[in-house]
Amino acid sequence: MPTLLGITGNVASGKSAVRQFLENEGALTIDADLLAQSTYLPGMPAYQPILEAFGSDLCYSDGQINRSRLGKIVFKDPGALRELEAIVHPLVIEGIEAVLARASVELVVVEAIKLFEAGLHARCDAVWTVTARDELRQERLMNTRGLTEADALLRIRSQSPQEEKTSRSDYIISTDGSFQDTYAQTTIGLKKLQAAPAGEIVSRGGELFLPLRPEAFTSARALLNRFFPQTWEDEDIYRSLSHRSVLAGFKEGELDALCSWKLEFFLGLVQSVIPYTPASEELKSALSVLAICAGEHLCKALYIPHEMIAPLSAKQLGFLPGESAVADVHPLSAANFLRKNGLVPGEVFVRSNLLS
């Protein structure tokens, strides 16, 4: 059974950045909020109970629940929030147990804002709390989530003080500083867990792939600066790693490739593979490695934009047209995931048999 680490903290404290840093190191991670949202979809277990509790007028024209409208209801009314949590929390715990039963990695991480309230902490082998100053959290809510000052304050004030979580935690991370500082704290915590880091994967072309780590940043910067208009500094790479996973490819000890991909609730998206061209054998070799990584993370589908790969190469690797149905993936989950990343199904290829 893998080690289960629980990460908690109040809204906009930086929990997701810490979770993503751990994911880059090979941990299988679960965003409990996204797991909860998946239960809201039409036909899923929480959908009808939520409509019965809060009204059918919550829905968009496509039948999906308007989570923004639902949020405004429950964040103003503690009783309504408790009612929603009573519907959703048992389903989230059930989903986490299902992941643990299938996991083959040493470390599973669950990020949950209500880790203690839902009783999830009792299931965890260790608990970390991520903190940030209230002013910084308010700024993040306004700048990254588009909330008004009033709505941001409402979200912050609706939650218990951060100290209630830190007093019950095994390790505390502050995100008041730089991304580099948060990464360093995460690395220290990972060593305390004594969980083995992600191992290397050798591609069929003989390239050695590892998670991108600080000791390779100098070479990574040189490669990134060749392909992107901005000038990359170390802090830019740390910031990037707080949003996506990056594999570094090495030949004869020298970094010669970077593969970035985004994983969200068991759906993956290849974001870049440099310096390889769309029809190259090196690209196909690197994508085979990414597919293995995605499978180890229990990813149900891996998407790649059309412009990144030649159609024949995609077909040879088992990728299908993006509109293809994928087993165990709700069509709205796939569409929402792609939309968040500026894509639609007709602009991608998809592969589901990820460990073959």
Image: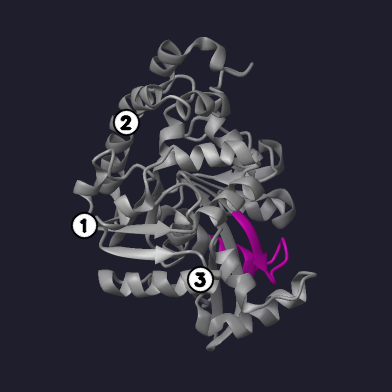
Which residue is drawn at the image coordinates 55% and 82% (left, top)? Answer: 216
Does the magenta segment cover residue 6? Answer: no
**261 or 129: which is nearer to us?**
129
**Residue range (magenta):** 270-287
Q: Amino acid at mark 3?
A: Arg
Q: Residue at x 40, y 14 (%)?
A: 53
Residue 22 % position (x, y): 41, 63
Pointer 3 or 1: first along the chain:
1
Total number of numbered discs in the rendering: 3
Dot 1 or dot 2, earlier in sequence:
2
Q: Secondary structure at mark 1?
A: loop
As helix, strand or loop, the secondary structure at mark 2 comes to: helix
Q: Nearer the viewer, residue 286 or 136?
A: 136
User: Residue 91's mark?
Assistant: 2
Quadrant for the N terminus, please. Answer: bottom left
Q: Position of residue 291 (x, y in %)?
A: 49, 56
Above or below 234: residue 311: above
Tag 3 residue: 204
Horizontal arrangement in the rendering, residue 288 relative to residue 30 (left or right): right
Identity of the residue drawn at 59% across and 46% down: 141
Sequence order check: which comes first, mark 3 or mark 2? 2
**Residue at image location 47% in from the left, 54% down from the top:** 13
Question: Residue beneath label 1, please?
Answer: 125
**274 is within the stretch colored magenta:** yes
Cα gap from disc 1 to disc 2, whole angstroms: 21 Å
